[in-house]
Amino acid sequence: MGEFKVHRVRFFNYVPSGIRCVAYNNQSNRLAVSRTDGTVEVYNLSANYFQEKFFPGHESRATEALCWAEGQRLFSAGLNGEIMEYDLQALNIKYAVDAFGGPIWSMAASPSGSQLLVGCEDGSVKLFQITPDKIQFERNFDRQKSRILSLSWHPSGTHIAAGSIDYISVFDVKSGSAVHKMIVDRQYMGVSKRKCIVWGVAFLSDGTVISVDSAGKVQFWDSATGTLVKSHLIANADVQSIAVAEQEDSFVVGTAEGTVFHFQLVPVTSNSSEKQWVRTKPFQHHTHDVRTVAHSPTALISGGTDTHLVIRPLMEKVEVKNYDAALRKITFPHRRLISCSKKRQLLLFQFAHHLELWRLGSTVATGTVEAMCLLAVSSDGNWLAASGTSAGVHVYNVKQLKLHCTVPAYNFPVTAMAIAPNTNNLVIAHSDQQVFEYSIPDKQYTDWSRTVQKQGFHHLWLQRDTPITHISFHPKRPMHILLHDAYMFCIIDKSLPLPNDKTLLYNPFPPTNESDVVRRRTAHAFKISKIYKPLLFMDLLDERTLVAVERPLDDIIAQLPPPIKKKKFGT
């Protein structure tokens, strides 16, 4: 790999916003995530959990609810009282509709996907019809005395459950009338609390309503009689979120203590047909409040104040035990936030609402606002490569201002790309960790790229769970490709053979001289360093100098509000 002088940068004061809502789409296997600053992200779980779409937030949009409807249509609602639909192709907000009920705290799409419910600050539950172009107000349900904090449809679409302060209401959808009001017990650890907030409800096919509340309880209600069936005290703080599996055989809840609990429906005895809900597994992957959870067919998904999106697989539901079954904790965006001017020794940092320009060795910063997209420009200024929301890449002739060629389509989204200065070869990284090299002048893949695809990458390379976010090249060594993700920096030497699965990928012993036969026999094209992490950016300033920008997780946690203190044994 050689020796480099490294500028180790840790003054990029980037802090991701906390996660407020997640919504899983079972039809497309995509996950929508909203953050406290109004940002909305869409992850493609089938494409190695890649963040394929991103909608910038705004300080006036505090998202409190997020849901999918009509298959691929994404809606959000928040404290500004508006319902918004997102254009997933143009990557902008298609429209916003005022619900005229004050701040919106909850939202749910009907099982058919043709109707939308919102719960408002003034106690109203409003029903909207989803039309091909927009949403249209249909009617109000019976108004309640306090804000509607949670909503859930019965799978038949005939009834809904609405969680409020101190009670749960069950509505008949056809008439809009409340048929039951179930009072929640304010008792917590033998002490009566002033209020009990129902943070989440789930309506099951058999008529059971599951609620989670600020008294730390998970409760089961019979919606036909309006009575409490069973209660579980699981936390010393609020239980803030709930999500049920599509098969209704398990559900997950998140607490303000940072714990996620898994409940499963199991037989009472080994030979019994009678089943009961049992708390089976607690998980502690968060340091702060778990504000939201989701349940996919194979994983439990959670997010909260600590900014982490945690995807924990259900091992009994995963058929093949491979890297897809590994715990994933996504903290940083899957796009580059830093750009570098090598000649002027400048770093450009992208924040949510401004940019900062830093000179290496200086402490002066300036800011402005600018939109970003995934582009690559050749060093001679002749070529521009652009990648949109799909996996396609188009190459344009800048001087003639016309499309030159389109790279053959690939199934997985592009995470990074760059054009080599000497050859005008376009190097493209995808979310499944594949790397391609495409000759722009010849309009075809290079021989090296064809060799790579024929032999295949090392299995450990493909099992990495963070995408490549930056690609660059060595100015004096045209056979070298430099790239990195959040946890490793790699130099690919195209003049050396590719490693096979029997070879040690992370090879720390490169050959030192021509007589070093053993080391030379094991040498391969990949030279990997894991010294710098989490690594947000790394690039060459010149042939012997690197700049590395890190963002330690401890520095982020230090700027978050303090978590709930839990008494530990012996303290």
Image: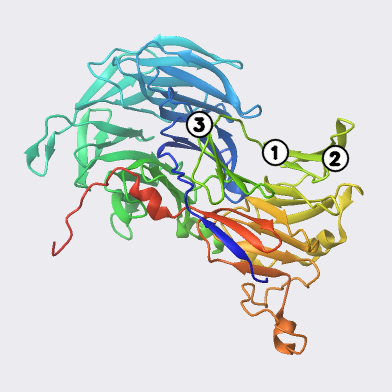
Location of the N terminus by quadrant is bottom right
Disc nearer the start of the sequence (1/2): 2
Residue that carries the numbered disc 1 in the rendered image: 390
Picture residue at 30% right of the left edge, 48% below the top:
277
> Toward which corner of the image does residue 281 lie, by quadrant?
bottom left
Above-or-below relation of 109 to 97 = below
Q: Which of 188 and 470 is in front in this view?
A: 470
Between 371 and 162, the one lying in front of the other is 371
Q: Quadrant of the C terminus?
A: bottom left
Q: How crowded is mark 2: few (under 14 residues within 10 Å), some or many (20 or more)?
A: some
Residue type pointed to by label 1: Ser
* Kind of residue indicated by mark 2: Asn
Q: Can residue 336 be seen here? A: no
Sequence-first tag of 3 and 1: 3
Disc 1 crowd, CA 10 A, few/some/many (<14, 14-19, 20+): some
Residue to which mark 2 is pinned: 382
Query: Regarding mark 2 in the picture, which secondary structure is present there?
Result: loop
Q: Name the residue under label 3.
A: 353
Residue 453 located left or right of residue 96: right
Q: Where is residue 232 in the image (x, y as percent from the top left)?
A: 21, 46
Q: Earlier in the sequence, mark 2 or mark 3?
A: 3
